[in-house]
Amino acid sequence: MNDLHARHRAVLPDWLTLYYDDPVEITHGEGRYVWDAHGRRYLDFFGGILTTMTAHALPEVTKAVTEQAGRILHTSTLYLNRPMVELAERVASLSGIPDARVFFTTSGTEANDTALLLATAHRRSGQILAMRNSYHGRSFSAVSVTGNRAWSPTGLSPLQTLYVHGGVRTRGPYAHLSDARFIEACVADLEDLLGHTGDVAALIAEPVQGVGGFTSPPDGLFAAFREVLDRHGVLWISDEVQTGWGRTGDHFWGWQAHAAAGPPDLLTFAKGIGNGMSVGGVVARAGIMNCLTANSISTFGGSPVTMAAGLANLSYLLEHDLQGNARRVGGLLLARLRAVTAGVPRVREVRGRGLMIGIELVRPGTDEADPRAAAAVLEAAREQGLLIGKGGGHDTSVLRVAPPLSLTVAEAEEGAAALERALRSIDL
């Protein structure tokens, strides 16, 4: 154990997860690459959990942060804040939600927590619907609507949560159905569930489940859900913490793959917008956002420095069409990964959209998830100079690939080749 690892274990919680048997200390980065304390370079295919969205050390963001820090670091929401207003205007316009209001937080957890507060206050109900295999953060309320046992440390809850089918297309009781029949079955399940409960405040759902292993339903599922929800007055919260800002390539927001029923009532975001700075938030129709009857502030949400970073990062993303790059390069990477894993018996499925790709591993000759293999490939990929993530539902058996959206074709090829070598090198 290295000295920093020993010090980490002596003062930080045991449940604070570290990747690798010999954890990596990342000291600096540039573009799509990072370096560790020993000077070794890695191609970063995880971006600090999908957070370094554009590039490491992006000059435009660094300049904006430096200049704002040189003026003032902090004021709080008790004072007018020009960067916060400017970013809110842009996010509201991009959200697709009519008469939108934006509240900034410091994380996706806090954003989802705020959305749950707004929905339950607006509907005067503590009943929430969530998706099986979902993840929404680590606060008390976010854990209580998380449908993934690996990330649910307590069964206690401030909310009453019921879980709906539909987040995982290729596993579960409806996996054998066609897409159309799959949607019909999930809608029937939702209808039945609403017939057994009282007034429900909201359904919270990730368009693509992140920690759950980059799983997603057929396009249109949430539009079909929305028709049912609207009849019952139930709000729809789209958790875009991982899917927002064009990462899926086909759409700027994940909800747009289910756009037939219009935008969600509330949308949460975080991670990529700050390119590493602590930015999260909620967008909601004014009638919902303004429903709170008590005072509230945010000490650190909407900080002048993080808002300056968000503005610079969003401008860069739009001006350089990184959504289009995610679609083009992500499509090439997905095809390449499917090709290089075609003869690997441990690979059950390669799935994803844009630069959000999951590789699900199983025990050869079975459909049984293999978390040991996922851990081994994570280690082997590091030896090949590639950083990836992992996740999954009942067992952590999915490799998560989510590079910065400025990834080049050459880097996609480099990463796919490294991952192929890692997959073929393990012997369990």
Image (spheres, rainbow, N blue to C red):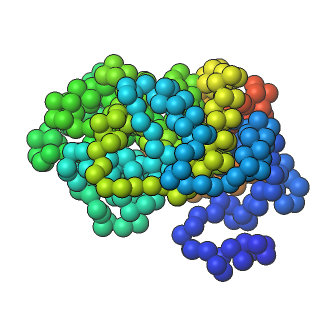
Q: What residue appears at the point 76 percent right and 72 percent down from the top-left corner?
A: 4
Q: Residue furthest front?
A: 79
Image x and y of residue 248, in percent: 54, 29
As rendered, which of 29 and 390 lies closer to the eye? 29
| Placement of the N terminus among the 4 image quadrants | bottom right
Residue at horizontal 72 percent and vertical 31 percent from the top? 407
Residue 21 locus on image (x, y percent):
69, 65
Give the vertical position of 9 relative to 217 (above or below).
Answer: below
Question: Residue at position x 38%, y 63% from top?
Answer: 140
Q: Is residue 14 left or right of residue 368?
A: right
Q: Quadrant of the C terminus?
A: bottom right
Where is residue 343? Give x, y as percent. 63, 33
Whether residue 38 is visible, yes or no, is yes
Left or right: 414, with 106 as reference point: right
Residue 339: name its quadrant: top right
Q: Look at the picture and state if 192 lies above or below 253.
A: below
Judged from this view, the residue extending furthest toward the right is 39
Q: Residue at x 72, y 46 (%)?
A: 68
- Is residue 259 depicted above or below 247 in this figure? above
Residue 236 visible in the displayed image: no
